[in-house]
Amino acid sequence: MICYECGHLINKDFAKFCDHCGSSLETKPTNASPKKEIKKNINDEIDQATNLFLLWNASITATFIFYIIYIVTDGYIYLFLLVLMMLTMSWMLLLTKLHDLVLIKHQSTKEFIFTNFGMPIIGTFYSFIKLTKK
């Protein structure tokens, strides 16, 4: 059984009240409250942003390496385009995670957007350092 108020799992089959919040299990409420959000630890969010930042830096390096290989050999254009796509995807993931950190820390979203799209590479480095303090 699951409590309609708090979402707590109840193992007893014939329980009439929730062990967690004490609400009645017999009547289903008309306006079921949404499940309470699980608050993530800010350190976990910063660690995830750091991992994405490292992935983005590795993608930048790989893009330059495959670009040089493409220029020198006049081949391997598919590898260069694949790595370039990986670079854009990792940048988008990093920006999403940094935007989540901006919302958690209650900072200005407009400043974040103008910083990252006005000066994309420098702005992303600046936002990462500012939000994670690393």
Image (cartoon, helix red, strand yellow):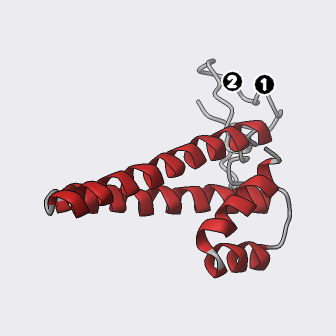
Q: Residue at x 71, y 75 (%)?
A: 115
Q: Horizontal placement of 32 versus 76: left or right?
A: right
Q: Residues within 10 Å of mark 2 (few under 14, many from 20)?
A: few
Task: For residue 71, say whether it is visible.
Answer: yes
Q: Residue at x 77, y 61 (%)?
A: 102
Give the percent coordinates (x, y) of residue 55. Answer: 50, 45
Q: Residue at x 85, y 66 (%)?
A: 107
Of all residues, the one furthest to the top in this rendering is: 12
Q: Nearer the viewer, residue 123 or 1?
A: 123
Q: Residue at x 30, y 54 (%)?
A: 66
Q: Amino acid at mark 1?
A: Asp
Q: Quadrant of the C terminus?
A: top right
Q: How many marks?
A: 2
Q: Amino acid at mark 2?
A: Ala
* Secondary structure state at the residue bearing disc 1: loop
Mark 2 vs 1: CB contact within 8 A: yes
Is 70 rendered above or below residue 5? below
Give the percent coordinates (x, y) of residue 18. Answer: 75, 30
Residue carrying label 2: 15
Which of the two discs, 2 and 1, sits closer to the camera?
1
Of all residues, the one furthest to the front in this rendering is: 72
Q: Nearer the viewer, residue 81 or 48?
A: 81
* Label 2, label 1: how far apart the Cα atoms are: 9 Å
Task: For residue 31, say whether it is visible.
Answer: no
Is 30 rendered above or below residue 4? below
Q: Quadrant of the N terminus?
A: top right
Q: Residues within 10 Å of mark 1 (few under 14, many from 20)?
A: some
Instruction: Quadrant for residue 42, please give it.
Output: top right
Give the percent coordinates (x, y) of residue 12. Answer: 63, 18
Residue 19: image tag: 1
Residue 38: image tag: none
Give the percent coordinates (x, y) of residue 14. Answer: 63, 22
